[in-house]
Image (cartoon, rainbow, N blue to C red):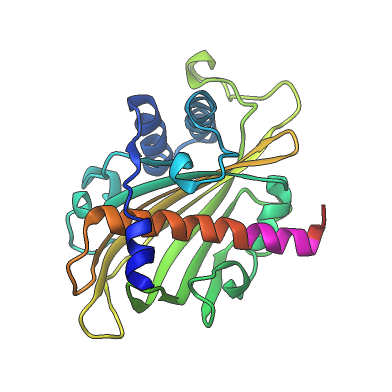
Amino acid sequence: MILATLLACARAPEPGNPEFNDAIHQAFVGFDDPEVELAFALRELERNIDANIDPTAKSSNDRALAPDPLTEDDIANLDHPDRDPEACIPVALVGLSAFPPEDAAAIQVLTDQTAVEPYSPNYFERTFLSGGDCWEDRGCDRMNTFNDLVKENFLMEVETSFFKDFRWIDLGLPDPADVPVGEEPTNPGQPRWAFVGRSWQDDSFDGKDGKSTLWQSYTIEVWIPRDGGTLRLLALWSETDLGISISDDVVAGTTRAGIDDNYKAQEKWLEEHFGR
């Protein structure tokens, strides 16, 4: 049964096009940049997804891409394991939620994340380093968290931790090139609030079997508002040693399916708490 599941997940995502890769890397690397620049990257991502991917496609295969690898320069400002980031397997998955980002923000302020993390059903605790008491309702624009968890799937079980930061971004801000030098960028109309999260490990973690290792992991995740809900995207770059011979395609496919299961678990939580 496990072998059949692995083989069913074996299809690797198609490579992202250059415009998608530029935008997703700008969002990851430029997470701490001025809001106007991050808003530009998110709009570029949105335009590229709308032109090339159907977020309502039933199969996660049809909503997946493989972004370009991260480089040493991309992670230079983050504490991270002494590993080559280009060894990571990249997977990005698009999805669509029936709920707005303002509802999805409630998930991010849960201390216990197990209800929305099907591959951490027994332990996933989020600690708020800053912004935990003001970010959800945009009383502050940034929240920083530290996360302890046990990750479990049929490939490995590992006790791990990571940092994850969140920012609210007004997509109604102008393009950076249209802002005169010395002027503060402003949105003259109604704000269009999205939020973005970036995570990273600062260490490597051995699996409970003593043979597997989660060497490094990085994500960028976006929630972009649209009529009737939210356009979602999560890109993950991770390097693991599973202690057995499994192809990169199988690992990528399993990762893609896992992200999609997370989307479904979060949608179920939103339905239970906000209704539709």
Q: Residue at x 78, y 63 (%)?
A: 273
Q: Judge whether 33 appears above or below 104 on screen.
A: above
Q: Which residues are magenta?
A: 266-273
Q: Residue at x 57, y 56 (%)?
A: 263
Q: Is residue 32 visible?
A: no
Look at the image and tell me in which quarter the N terminus lies: bottom left
150 with respect to 225 (left or right): left
Q: Judge whether 197 appears above or below 224 on screen.
A: below
Q: Judge whether 275 appears above or below 202 on screen.
A: above
Q: Position of residue 141 (x, y in %)?
A: 62, 48
Q: Nearer the viewer, residue 265 or 237?
A: 265
177 with respect to 202 (left or right): right
Q: Position of residue 116 (x, y in %)?
A: 60, 67
147 with respect to 273 (left or right): left
Quarter location, residue 65: top left
Q: Residue at x 56, y 48 (%)?
A: 167
Asked if residue 89 lies in the magenta stretch, the reply is: no
Q: Is residue 24 visible?
A: yes
Q: Nearer the viewer, residue 241 or 38?
A: 241
Q: Residue at x 18, y 60 (%)?
A: 83
Q: Which residue reaches farthest bottom?
A: 209
Quarter location, residue 19: top left
Quarter location, residue 15: top left
Q: Judge whether 219 appears above or below 116 on screen.
A: above
Q: Main secondary structure of the magenta part?
A: helix
Asked if residue 270 lies in the magenta stretch, the reply is: yes
Q: Position of residue 185 (x, y in %)?
A: 59, 24
